[in-house]
Amino acid sequence: MTSWQQDVLGPNFEQLTLDLPAGSPATLVRHVGESSPGASSALAGVDILYVHGWSDYFFQHELAEFWHRAGANFYALDLHNYGRSLRPGLLPGQVSSLTEYDDDIAAALSAMGRSGIPEAAPAGLGVEDSAGQQTAVADGPDEEAEQQSFELAFLEEARHRLSAAFDALAGRERPEETPEPSGERPLVLLGHSTGGLTLSLWAARHPGAAAAVVLNSPWLEFQASEVGRAMVAPLIQARTRFRPMVPFPSIDPGFYTRAVSKRFDGEWEYESLWRPDRGFPVTPSFLHAVFQGQAHVAQGLGLDVPVLVMLSDKSYLQPKWSSTALAADVVLNVDTVAKRALDLGSKVTLHRIPGAFHDVFLSPSKIREQAYAGMGRWVEAALDTAARDRWREQAHRAPEFKARI
């Protein structure tokens, strides 16, 4: 691991190269400006870890500045084979499983000074194969061990639910079992698009590691819905076996770039080599990895921490340009994602923002202001332990009050 150096975003940003076991490095970026005197007490000292989406990298300096003014420590991770982490000869964005990013995240958390991150829980979720039979999703070559992990996790979950049911029948109240976040500082995970899917899966495998999860237009489901994914997945899987690295023909019409880039109708300047106008080539291997992740989400992740999902109020997925693209998500079917978000856990808040782009924080300035305010207010409330304890005490007293009436 090298030392921190000034980043391309300017003097208030530094970057650190993270050496990973697989060889391809990742890059961590941090904001190092002077502390803000108006910082929120609930957010002071909180660690924010941002992960970008597909064919993207971190350049949203305004997002970092927002969190810095709130008193948080902001970090952004350019995953291996993306952005600052790209090296000659590497295939941009290539990954065969989203769990490969576990090493990136672990290295980032270590560089942030965090220790004691819980070990990954067994991946015990099943998905439907092309024949409609239930199978365990294997993240590695040992499918037998994966099946055993699935069975153990299933039995443990069944035991927990039966115990809770018996307690309910007996009239006994069970205290809410929420693991305390590891480390001295609360960790908030902030992911965009594929990064949102990746962080959701990571948080489910590492219960107790994060205090809250914020998702900015997460790619939780295929644009054509779960039915469409189920129809396409076997074809993608077959191509992954025989031609995993041969990219599909590009179908990106460039509308998103036109809406975001300052060269066209947008407000943002960025490195086009790290964020091409029509995106990186999509390989069957990468798409299969995303489909596997989305299948996990569809089975229910059971996240035990508060989750905020931010989405535009509408999509524009037509092949012909329209001014509607300047006030909509032109990448995802936001209604499909909104429905899938309910499978993340039991503490999900959905914020639909009129006129927002796919990356909410690249939207026009007035819309960004609304998004920042809503996100900051939500995270502050999610991390306000004093308020949480106060309202929990109020709720505990409610039956006592009712009994006196």
Image (cartoon, grey):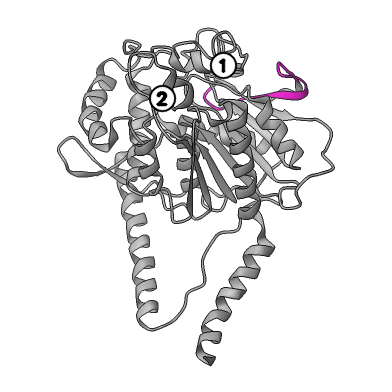
Residue plotted at (49% across, 30% down): 355
Disc assigned to residue 266: 1
Q: Is residue 139 visible?
A: no
**Left or right: residue 341 compared with residue 367:** left
Residue plotted at (60% across, 49% down): 378
Distance between the Cα atoms at labels 2 and 1? 16 Å
The spot of residue 340 in percent (x, y) is 36, 43
* Residue 11 part of the magenta-drawn span: yes
Of residue 368 and residue 241, the one placed in the foreground of this image is 368
**Left or right: residue 153 compared with residue 99:** left
The spot of residue 337 in percent (x, y) is 38, 38
Residue plotted at (33% across, 32% down): 222
Residue plotted at (41% across, 83% down): 171
Q: Secondary structure at mark 1?
A: loop
Q: Is residue 322 visible?
A: yes
Tell me the quarter of the picture where residue 317 sits.
top left
Give the magenta part as a residue range: 6-22
* Residue 264 part of the magenta-drawn span: no
Name the residue type under label 2.
Val
Q: Residues within 10 Å of mark 2 (few under 14, many from 20)?
A: some
Q: Is residue 92 above or below residue 216?
A: above
Q: Which residue is mark 2?
A: 331
